[in-house]
Amino acid sequence: FLLYTLLPKSPPTHIMRLLTHNVLRNNTKAANGSNTPLRITATEVRVDEPTSNNDPDAERREVEFAKNMMPALNWDTLIEGAKSMGLDSLPPSVTPELANDEGFLRALYHVLMDVHLVNGMLTCTETGREFAVTNGIANFMLEEDECEV
């Protein structure tokens, strides 16, 4: 069961964006430095409405942000994360034409910044270690025996 809500943008409280998920990794000793992305199991997702509509300066900032973030993104991780949160509109790869398309870049900004994992689980595909996400906060607290020496 996935609770999916579209809300007007509110002041941020505790939120986990897809952008954040894109860089999270399991740092337990068992993961042994693996760079494997965490799988999302979402039970509640929040999607905020874009606030830049009809504001050319805000739209320009969104386009520039998305364009500058693209080299840092793990695209496959973003696609998998978005799908697990109910979004399947991302293309399988980014062509040079898309990378310069303002409509695509604004949509990418929306996916990165306005889609939030509120409640669910992040699971390491290497070790099976689960990290709960509650009210937008991922619990990465480790037990002593999970820490590297």
Image: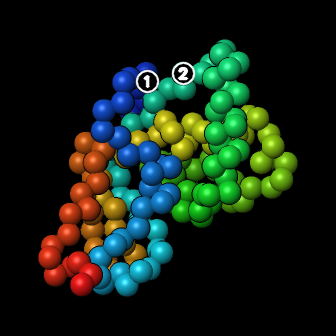
Residue 101 visible in the current orientation? yes
Which residue was labeled with disc 2?
51
Residue at the location (42% across, 61% down)? Answer: 24
Q: Nearer the viewer, residue 32 or 2?
A: 32
Residue 123 locus on image (x, y percent): 34, 68
Residue 31 locus on image (x, y percent): 36, 81
Q: Is residue 113 above or below residue 19?
A: above
Residue 19, numbered circle: none
Q: Is residue 50 above or below residue 75?
A: above
Residue at the location (60% across, 39% down)? Answer: 109
The quarter of the displayed image where residue 132 is located: bottom left
Q: Is residue 49 above or below residue 43?
A: above
Q: Secondary structure at mark 1?
A: loop
Residue at the location (50% across, 26% down)? Answer: 49
Amino acid type, residue under disc 2 in the picture: Thr
Residue 119 locus on image (x, y percent): 28, 47
Residue 9, numbered circle: 1
Amino acid type, residue under disc 1 in the picture: Lys
Q: Give the position of the C terminus as an image quadrant.
A: bottom left
> Tags 2 and 1 in contact by the CB under 8 Å rule?
yes
Q: Secondary structure at mark 2?
A: loop
Q: Earlier in the sequence, mark 2 or mark 1?
A: 1
Give the CA separation, mark 2 to mark 1: 7 Å
